[in-house]
């Protein structure tokens, strides 16, 4: 009689399944970060359409974002390092 799954084949299949599961966990790791926030004026009113510039001060590389209608912005996929954030909007100094 022919055996479909020998003990050796089961062990091999279990090992492959374990490797696949572990590789999925490794892919979920991320070393980059993000900066999010809400831009408001001195009266605590939101500022839609403001341009937010996030600059890595070590490399001088900048990323830009624009605030939405609620003043919210986010800049994603930032490499580790020191950053400065500046905001510009028409009518503000």
Image (cartoon, helix red, strand yellow):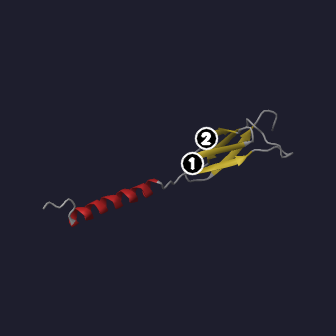
Foreground: 79 or 8?
A: 8
Determine whether 79 is above or below 19 in the image.
above
Going by the image, does 29 lie left or right of 20? right
* Image quadrant in which you'd find residue 69: top right
* Relative to 20, residue 90 above or below: above
Circles 2, 1 touching at the beta carbon (< 8 Å): yes
Q: In the image, residue 60 lies at what x, y percent?
A: 59, 44
Element type where label 1 sits in the image: strand
Residue 47 at x, y = what percent? 78, 39
Residue shown at 42% from the left, 55% from the top = 24
- The kind of secondary structure element at disc 2 is strand
In the displayed structure, does residue 44 sit left or right of residue 27? right
Q: Residues within 10 Å of mark 2 (few under 14, many from 20)?
A: some
Which percent across, then down, holds residue 63? Answer: 61, 41
Which residue corresponds to the image point at 75% horizontal and 37% vertical from the top-left? 48
Q: Position of residue 32 (x, y in %)?
A: 54, 51
At 71% from the left and 38% from the top, the residue drawn is 68
Pick the quarter of the image with the N terminus.
Answer: bottom left
The residue at the point 51 percent across, 54 percent down is 31
Q: Which residue is mark 1?
A: 78
Q: Is residue 13 left or right of residue 51?
A: left
* Residue in the foreground of this view, choosing between 52 and 69: 69
Q: Is residue 83 above or below residue 69?
A: below
Kindly give the residue lying farthest to the top in the view shown: 90
The residue to which callout 2 is attached is 63
Work out whether mark 2 precedes mark 1 in sequence or the reverse, and give the earlier one.
2
């Amino acid at each position: 009689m022919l055996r479909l799954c020998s003990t050796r084949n089961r062990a091999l299949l279990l090992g492959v399944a374990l490797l696949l599961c572990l590789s999925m966990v490794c892919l979920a790791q991320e070393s980059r970060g993000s900066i999010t926030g809400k831009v408001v004026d001195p009266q605590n009113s939101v500022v839609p359409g403001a341009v937010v510039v996030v600059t890595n001060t070590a490399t001088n590389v900048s990323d830009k974002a624009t605030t939405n209608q609620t003043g919210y912005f986010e800049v994603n996929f930032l490499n580790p390092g020191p950053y400065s954030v500046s905001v510009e909007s028409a009518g503000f100094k």
